[in-house]
Amino acid sequence: MQLRVLFMCAVIGCAQAMAAPVVSQPLVVRTQAQWQALLASNRATPLDALTPYGKQVVTEMLSASFREDGLPSLPSGILVRELNREELRAVLVFLDSEAYFPMLERQLVGAPLRMPPSDAVARDWRQLENALRSADPSPQSASATTLASDKSIDTYLALFGDRMREQRLRAQPPGDLLLLFNAAAFTNLVNPGSPAFAHLLRVHRELARRGVDTRRTLDDTVLHALIAAREFGQARAFIAPHSHLAPNAVPQVVDTLGAAFAGCSVFDYDRASHTLTRKDLPVAAGTELVMVVDVHCQPSRRALEALRNDAALRARLQQAGLTITVPPAAPIPFGLVADWNAANPALPMHIPFSHREWASVNVRSVPMFFLLKNGRVVDEVRGWPPEGNANALRALLDAYPVVREHAQRRH
């Protein structure tokens, strides 16, 4: 009897095991070969949760980005804009990028924006994207990060300038407004001080007037653009009715010079009080060297590291009257400035007060080194490739030996 019971239990257990559902592992694509095979199979994927337009955009981006060793960049913008939390997590798992979920989840404020554009606007947006990508075709592009491009602003104005008139915006469908917003935002990022800044604010107002929930990425984009443009008062006013933006502290500003000041000025940044204090930056007598760097630029970080580690190079540049700044109209890298100044008090990094005051220093890319004589640029060196660019800097200074005679610095 006992043997029969044991036998029956074994049979039942075996039957239960056979009947248990097989738990399949989530689909994950890690290499270009896997991605191409998946496309050929026409198999369902988590990307199907996107709108047809969104899926097409993401598919094209992945096809252009995937390498045999993985995915170097993630098309996060449209994923955040169109997906809910569960859909976003599934897509990130699918792309072997789940580690990005906590960061991207914070941007999921409000309902997904699933409003596809018209074919005409989508076509023009793609043409602008291509112009932005090819903004800097020079062979040095791997050693520097492009910040501005006449070609891209001309393309933007030709394709979207007339559409940005208020009367025409009123006639645009919501899906087209989203791409118009993208066009203005990206052009403003690459071309600070261009008409795209005003267009960005105008499209945002029209979206809000239509009742579109702008909390999903759009409000953050406007706020960052306002701070980059040094419109701090306008930024505070923008945050006031948008409670989800409250954690984004706008710096306090102490202006010791006033609106009537004519000249070149910078902000000193105090991290403890999150305060920017404006001060005069007199033009050095004779010649000086201005170094412009930015936080999201790996060549800039290499240049700063070389300056920190190469005592001979540092001494030579200091002898030339070195001034270090961030770009005049880019988003202010508060962390970079505070960290650098704490570690390098003898070589402070400055924040230009405005794009207008620094217009003579044409910062088209970073890092850039400008040699100035009586406040006017006479020569420049661009970029910092992995092998360094110290020899080009020394050659620049050798070509203007008077530089070595001036120790006056803009601090």
Image: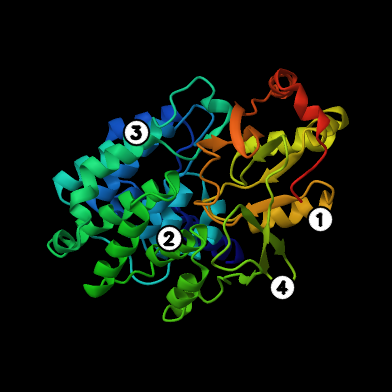
Q: Amino acid at mark 4?
A: Ser
Which of marks 3 and 4 precedes in the sequence?
Answer: 3
Residue on which the image places disc 2: 221
Pointers 2 and 4 in contact (C-beta within 8 Å): no
Residue 151 is labelled as 3
- Percent position of residue 354, x then y: 54, 55
In this rendering, which labeled residue sits more in front, label 1 or label 3?
3
Element class at badge 4: loop
What is the crowding at mark 2: few (fewer than 14 residues within 10 Å), some, or many (at least 20)?
A: some
Element class at badge 1: helix
What is the crowding at mark 1: few (fewer than 14 residues within 10 Å), some, or many (at least 20)?
A: few
In this rendering, which labeled residue sits more in front, label 2 or label 1?
1
Residue on which the image places disc 4: 273
Above or below: residue 226 compared with residue 77? below
The structure's colour scheme is rainbow
Q: Quadrant of the N terminus?
A: bottom right
Q: Nearer the viewer, residue 244 or 330?
A: 330
Pointers 3 and 2 in contact (C-beta within 8 Å): no
Q: Nearer the viewer, residue 95 or 42?
A: 95
Mark 4 vs mark 3, CA separation in Å: 41 Å
Mark 1 vs mark 4, CA separation in Å: 15 Å
Is 206 displayed left or right of 69 in the figure?
Answer: left
Which of marks 1 and 2 precedes in the sequence?
Answer: 2
Which of marks 4 and 1 precedes in the sequence?
Answer: 4
Residue 342 is labelled as 1
Above or below: residue 302 compared with residue 3? above
Which residue ends up furthest to the left in the rendered image? Answer: 171
Q: Amino acid at mark 1?
A: Ala
- Percent position of residue 347, x then y: 80, 46
- Percent position of residue 79, x then y: 38, 54
